[in-house]
Each structure stands twice: as C-alpha cells, then as structure tokens.
Image (spheres, rainbow, N blue to C red):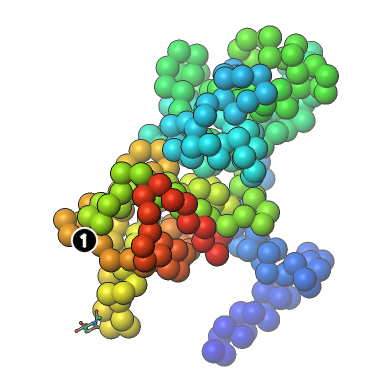
Amino acid sequence: MATSHFLLVVIFFITSLFHVPKLCLGLNLKKHLSLLSGVQPHWASAGATWYGSPYGAGSNGGACGYGGTVSQDPFSSLVTGIGPSLYKSGKGCGRCYKVKCTKHPSCSKKPVTVVITDYCPGGTCAVGSAHFDLSGTAFGAMAIPGQEEHLRDAGVIEIRYARVACDYPGKTIAFHVDAGSNPNYFAVVIQFEEGDGDLASVEIIEESLTNDSNEEWLSLQQSWGADWKIDPGRELHAPFSIRLRSQYSNNTLVAKNVIPVGWKPGATYRSMVNY
Ligand SMILES: *[C@@H]1O[C@H](CO)[C@@H](O)[C@H](O)[C@H]1NC(C)=O
Ligand SMILES: *[C@@H]1O[C@H](CO)[C@@H](O)[C@H](O)[C@H]1NC(C)=O
C-alpha cells in the first residue's frame, strides 16, 4: 500500500512536469508508460503502391482477419497491405506506421498514419527492404489536396516510413470470435490495440473454474494474421478473461470476462480496456 501511494505521488509529480491537465491524467499516464509512444520516429525508405478502389480500403478485409472493420472507424480505410519484411507472418498485423511521400511533384510531404491489415506477398511487394501496398484512400492522403489522382497514376513511388504508437481515442480492444469456433475450439481475431498495436501472446482463463488458489491461464497460438486459437482437447467453459502481451513494449493487459456465457461464433465482444 505504502509503495503504491509513493509511486502515485512520483508519477503525479512526473506528469505534472508535462503540464498535463488533471482531467486527462489517467489517459496521459497510459501514453507516457507506453514505450513506443516515447520513441522518436525512425524514418526509413520503402516502396509504395496502392490497390483496390481509389477511395476504398484496399481489400474488403485482408489477411489479418479484421474483416469489414477496415473501412470503418477507427481504421477508416487508412490501412495498408505490407510486404513480407514487415508482415512477419502476421506478427505485424495491427502495427501503425507514419508514411509520407516526398519525391513525386504531387506529394504533400505530410505524414499519414496507417495500420497494417493485409499481406502483399509477392511482385513489387517483395522487392527492396520494405513495401507498403496502401489502400487507395491512404495513398491519396499522401498527396497535395486536389492532386490525389496524379499521385495514384504514378505507379510505384518511394516513400519514407516510421513505426509509431497506435492511437484510437475512445476505442477499447475488440474480440471477434471466429465463425469456426465451438465449445472445444476457440479462435478469436483481436483488434484496436493502442500503443504497439501487435501481440506477442494471448492467453485465456475460464473464470468459472478459477479461484484464488487455483489459477490456470491457457495459451492460444497465433493461427494466421491477427487470429489466435486454442484446441485444448476438452470443452472450454465461459466466461473467459483474456490476457494480452504486446511485442515491443512487453505490456500485459487483462480483458476481464470479455467472452460471456453463451458466446456465439461470429460475434464481436468489446472489452473495457486498452493499452
Ligand atoms: C479451488 O481451488 C482448490 C484448491 O486448488 C480446488 O481443490 C478446487 O477444486 C477449486 N475450485 C474450483 C471451483 O475450481
Ligand atoms: C516480458 O514481461 C514478462 C513479465 O510480464 C517477463 O517475464 C518477460 O521476461 C518479459 N520479456 C521480455 C522480452 O522482456
């Protein structure tokens, strides 16, 4: 108790140095504690193309498994397919990058933040150290207003990119239960993680079987993209809490009882938490 009070006082003192208004204390604390947020963007060069419709989200879902949400708030079509070097067999799903184009005359040179939602395995996407196959919306957003068409006609362009913390104001982490799930097999697509945006591990606990002396977290395996699965060889009993650990910052977070009794395959369950 004493230590946690002392910690709070220290943290309050530190945040007061940043002139954080009192009302936003909780939110800003969270941001300051996220490692990636504190990192200066490290810019590097990549190739960029676009796919899908000129004002669309690239795909209707993409290899990460986020489905139709790619075109909805908070992704809002500012999404990208990515070459193998940054897709990392799906471990890159959900990461956020700033991208900007500087060389083509129609470039605004202003950075646009995009989220990895899809995989682009071959062709130009496999050339060079990194490649972004942006949605038409994201590609156009790098242009001087009114010159989006010119930029989209440019073919492959060179861009600068930097990993940044994901920020989804007012959004909590969502769990979309895979349509193929049943009492003996549970698979879930996880999205809208702030900060790192990615996940190193996912575990569930069956709250109905838990008590203080007997706690068992079960590990899920990454199935594909942002989809994680468990096949425990027995029936699982809801409600489940889900524990997430981010890759870059190694932060853990528990979404308590996020999967309720009577959960349905294909349904999305919203947690109360985010990084
Ligand atoms: C609670 O923990 C004890 C000791 O590990 C165990 O014997 C008991 O079965 C547990 N209860 C439930 C409901 O899991
Ligand atoms: C991540 O954090 C866990 C504890 O939450 C720790 O056991 C583990 O060693 C950490 N991993 C790295 C790579 O720092």
| Frontmost residue, 33 versus 234 | 234
For this view, does 87 lie left or right of residue 24? left
Residue carrying label 1? 235
The C terminus lies in which quarter of the figure?
bottom right
The x and y percentages for residue 178 are 37, 45
| Frontmost residue, 47 versus 229 | 229
* Residue lying furthest bottom: 2
For this view, does 7 lie left or right of residue 184? right
Element at badge 1?
loop
Q: Is residue 168 above or below residue 61?
A: below
Question: Which residue: 26% across, 79% down?
Answer: 214
Locate residue 72: give its quadrant: top right
Q: Is residue 15 above or below residue 65?
A: below
| Frontmost residue, 91 versus 243 | 243
Q: What residue type is labelled 1?
A: Glu
The x and y percentages for residue 45 are 61, 24
For residue 33, say whether it is visible: yes
The N terminus lies in which quarter of the figure?
bottom right
